[in-house]
Image (spheres, rainbow, N blue to C red):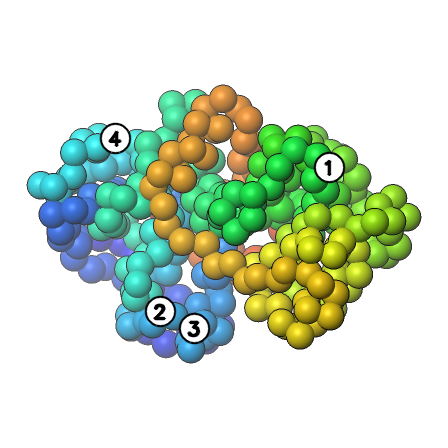
Amino acid sequence: MKVMIINQFGDSDVLQLADIPVPSIKDDEVLIQVSHTSVNPADWKIRAGLYEYLLPYKFPIILGWDAAGVISEVGCKVSRFKKGDRVFSYCRKPVIQQGSYAEYLAIDADAVAHIPNNISFAEAATIPMTGLTVWQCLFETIRLTAGQTILIHGGAGGIGSIAIQLAKLQQTTVYTTASLHNHDYVYSLGADIAIDYQNQDFVKEIAAREPAGIDLVLDTRGGEVQQNSYQIIKKGGHLISLVTPPDDDEAAAYQVHAEFVFGYPNGEQLKELAKLLEKKQLKPTIYEEMSLEGAAIAHDMNRNGRLERGKLVLHITPSS
């Protein structure tokens, strides 16, 4: 089968197209013929070695944590799926080695859910990692409820665009940062107030509207953005970072609960996201679709911030 692998950490030029045997499955796994995957920041961070001390790995590594495709084989202990089912999965495994930049993927059935008929493989591939991460932030790490206020940094991105939609389903007030060019887009997702991070100070803008502070900041930026975010959170409120673990002392000084979330695979939660997709209450955004052979270009675009909105998707054409 065709795969995109790395044999060492490095720049995007370490990505190599290769041909390897189709993996065999365990009794509790399914084999997915992958149609589409999407590019997450985690992909190029793994490739660059930035997660070398965070997650166990083994070379050669097939990158990719999102998969959408058709089940081609079912383990003998799996009853929820059958051959031919359209499915998607957040396919991160305990050891980074076998990902979704591949024609076929063997994955635990508990990490898989059916794709609604009204959603394409390309659209479905944008959802698993980002959707589950946001779900676990808003409904597991905390319990976001109606009437609360939230700031989502980077509302036009893969994480932010889903976070806006899920937060609005809870009848919250949503602030988000985005370039002026993307304000119409984030408003179309449901944002209440968009702040131009290039020309406006989000601390001043929110403090003027919410003098008592807001309930939650979803941090997709880290660094100075994370540090400044504490100033607008009410005492007892929350900061959830998806990029760098918050400083406990700094959070304590502001009397804020601060946590770092690294999303994990969960088929039951993915099933809930599928229901929202089916009802059109959650809309995927594809910035561009490319071939698997264009993975290096896609990595560079993702890393260099050249995505205006949504996610890059890779189409995996079957080898002849």
User: How far apart, in angstroms, are the residues tagged by discs 4 and 1?
Assistant: 38 Å
Viewer-proximal residue among 25 and 266: 266
Instruction: Report the disc number at residue 85.
Output: 4
Q: Are marks 2 and 4 in contact (CB under 8 Å)?
A: no
Q: Earlier in the sequence, mark 1 or mark 2?
A: 2
Q: Residues within 10 Å of mark 2 (few under 14, many from 20)?
A: many
Residue 83 vs 52, above or below: the answer is above
Residue type at mark 4: give it. Answer: Asp
The residue shown at (45%, 34%) is 273
Give the residue type that dot 2 points to.
Ile
Q: Residues within 10 Å of mark 1 (few under 14, many from 20)?
A: many
User: Hey, what amino acid is under mark 3?
Assistant: Leu
Between marks 1 and 3 in the image, the one whose residue lies nearer the viewer: 1
User: Mark 1 and 2 residues: CB-CB less than 8 Å, in contact?
Assistant: no
In the image, farthest residue toward the left: 76
Rendering coords of residue 127 (x, y %): 47, 41
Q: In the rendered image, which quarter is residue 87 located in?
A: top left
Q: Which mark is residue 54?
A: 3
Please report the residue visible at 27 percent of the width from the left and 44 percent of the height from the top.
Answer: 110
Q: Quadrant of the C terminus?
A: top left
Disc 2 marks which residue? 6
Front position among marks 4 and 1: 1
Q: Earlier in the sequence, mark 4 or mark 1?
A: 4
Nearer mark to the viewer, of 2 and 3: 3
Q: Residue at image x 37%, y 60%?
A: 63
| Amino acid bearing label 1 | Thr
Distance in Å between CA atoms under marks 2 and 4: 30 Å
| Residue under the image location 58 percent in, 36 percent down | 166
